[in-house]
Amino acid sequence: MKTGIGEEKINEAYEIAKEAYSRFGVSTDKAIGKALAIPVSIHCWQGDDVVGFEGAEILSGGGLLTTGNYPGRARNGDELRGDAELAFSLIPGKKRFNLHAIYAETDGEKISRDAIEPDHFSKWMSWSKKKKIPLDFNPTVFAHPMADSGYTLASADPNIRAFWIRHCKAARKIASAFGKNQGCPAVNDLWIADGSKDYPADRLGPRRRLNGALDEIFDIKYPAETITDTVECKLFGIGSEAYVVGSHEFYMGYAAKKQIKLCLDTGHFHPTETIADKISAMLLFVPGLLVHFSRGLRWDSDHVTTFSDEMRDACREIVRSGALDKIDIALDYFDASINRIAAWTIGARNLRKALLEALLEPTRLIVDAEKYGRNHERLALMEECKTLPFSAVWDYLCLKSKAPVSAEWLTLVNAYEEKVLRKRQ
């Protein structure tokens, strides 16, 4: 597939773009450097359809469902790591890798989720150190007999609740071990699917129980340099269409009370609701945010991210707020109907592209125009930015970071599919 442009042409186009942006006071070289330095945490579960290594053929339930049967799903840790490495080579910039608890490697031994230990992730930690790819973590509070009722940490059954409290405590211990191993904090994001398919009579009771369970989970203190705790809200899920215990308002209050980070997932709100406006509002009350970039489509929250207005608005708000040091950025979606490595690559390249575009905005000029009441100038500058030669800067970023330019990466993915993925049938 011939989709690329020669290096000479890329350099020529970049010099023209560089001059165009400089007229607005923007250094493209600095923007590229900043865009490449922002870590993006790539989610492991796209590579195997959220199946994990507990022995399930398909993992669903608890508010999630993976659809599709494209060939080549990773079946073990070695395959998943190999697939991820190919995706990493196609994605420019700093990367992290995000694991769920169900990706423990136990050498065939059945380990209860409330008994997992850092040793069960020793292969992941060795790989992380060798590849210089930091790890993040998530307790897996779904798709388990103890979640069949639709309630886990908010369950009225004290035995069920205690089981999941133990699991979430084990997850935090593992995340802290990751952080110690890699020399930087692992983000540990807690999301549960607890809720009701139809309207409940008691909304307060489950939330009171969840509040108590979370207090117990976060009671153990780990060094801040090893772990960053976050809690994640959702509007609704499959089987919890009418009521979700961990709503935005619940976790907004909880994160502010406990002074931990709040996770905003772009697919977890109303279809017409954008998270861009929530970023500055929440930064006043919590120490930081985790932003999960996904794409909601009708009732599904987890389509591959596109270079959409929503993504671009959120990235612009992150940059305009000057909060890159307070916001962790990650991907969260799963599509089993297309090549999984391509799904990783499309979403991550789009996210890096949106971050670059945000960093190329002449923010100082726009803010100054607003400050002095020249709102016509503010609007004009915002509109002029839309037709600046952004694509030439993006191509140059890819070239500089030795990532494929344009859609050249498809050739490598297609070759890997023929050589490796289709042999996994």
Image (spheres, helix red, strand yellow):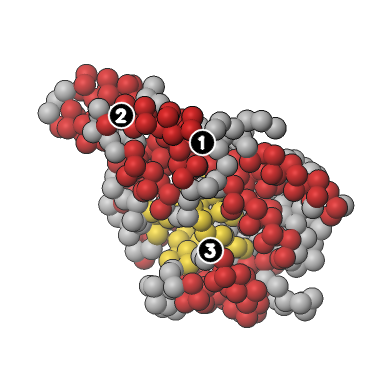
Q: Which residue is mark 3?
A: 133
Q: Dots 3 and 2: beta carbons under 8 Å?
A: no
Tell me if I can see residue 310 in this picture. no
- SS category of the residue bearing label 1: helix
Tell me if I can see residue 331 in this picture. yes
Q: Position of residue 339 (x, y in %)?
A: 72, 43
Q: Quadrant of residue 117?
A: bottom right
Left or right: residue 404 compared with residue 25: right
The three-letter code of the residue at mark 2 reads Glu
Residue at 24 percent of width and 25 percent of height: 378
Q: Which residue is mark 1?
A: 7
Q: Dots 2 and 1: beta carbons under 8 Å?
A: no
- SS category of the residue bearing label 3: loop
What is the spatial separation of the Cα atoms under label 3 and label 1, in whole angstroms?
A: 28 Å
Q: Position of residue 186 (x, y in %)?
A: 48, 67
Residue at 76 percent of width and 77 percent of height: 107
Residue at 34 percent of width and 64 percent of height: 259
Give the quarter of the figure containing the N terminus: top right
The three-letter code of the residue at mark 3 reads Ile
Is 203 located above or below residue 349 in the figure? below
The earlier-in-sequence mark between 3 and 2 is 2
- Disc marking residue 19: 2
Residue ranking furthest to the front: 8
Q: Is the residue marked by circle 1 packed among few (<14), some (14-19), or many (20+) residues within 10 Å?
A: few
Q: Position of residue 30 (x, y in %)?
A: 32, 44
